[in-house]
Image (spheres, rainbow, N blue to C red):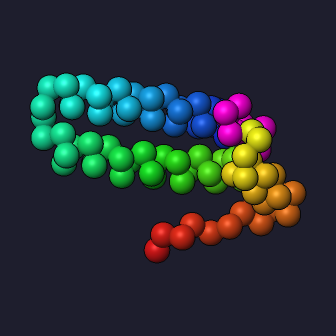
Amino acid sequence: MATLKSLNGLLTKASRSLDEAASQIKSLGLQPRKNIRNIAEILVAIFEIQGQIHAKRPDLIPSFLRNTDYARKMKRVALSGKPKSSKRA
């Protein structure tokens, strides 16, 4: 069954895999500028989805972000019950 926790975990794994892929692209010289930019755009999309998850479940925010402005904002959003809309059109 799909849960916010399981989706967040999948997205975290995907972002780690993409990070490793970017390193290998650079090492192999496979059009690094173009391909790493493509990976960066995918990572931005992943982080936007994770932001939506964290707005509903602040307990899923990674430990390295827990005492940050981001975590405080997500907790406020979760308490208000009103997630902010994405800035993207």
Identified at 45% across, 29% down, the residue is 16
- Choose between 27 and 16: the one closer to the eye: 27
At x 77%, y 66%, the residue is 82
Residue 3 placed where, x, y %? 67, 37
Q: Is residue 89 visible?
A: yes
Q: Is residue 74 visible?
A: no
Determine the residue located farthest toward the right in the rendered image.
79
Q: Give the image location of residue 47, x and y in percent.
A: 52, 48
Q: Main secondary structure of the magenta part?
A: helix
Tell me, yes or no, whether the highlighted magenta stretch contains residue 64: yes
Q: Is residue 82 above or below residue 11?
A: below
Instruction: Please give the range of residues in magenta.
Output: 58-65
Tally of marks: 0
Is residue 72 in the magenta section?
no
Q: Considering the image in quadrants, where does the N terminus appear?
A: top right
Q: In the visual, does 8 lie left or right of 37? A: right
Where 77 falls versus 15 (above or below)? below
Relative image position of residue 34 (x, y in whole percent): 19, 48
Determine whether, in the image, residue 9 is placed left or right of residue 35. right
**Compared with residue 78, is residue 28 higher up or lower down, i.e. above or below?**
above
Please tell me which residue lies in front, 56 or 19.
Answer: 19
Residue 49 percent across, percent down from the top left: 55, 51
Q: Residue at x 54, y 54 (%)?
A: 48
In the displayed image of the protein, which residue is found farthest to the front? 68
Picture residue at 36% right of the left edge, 33% below the top: 18
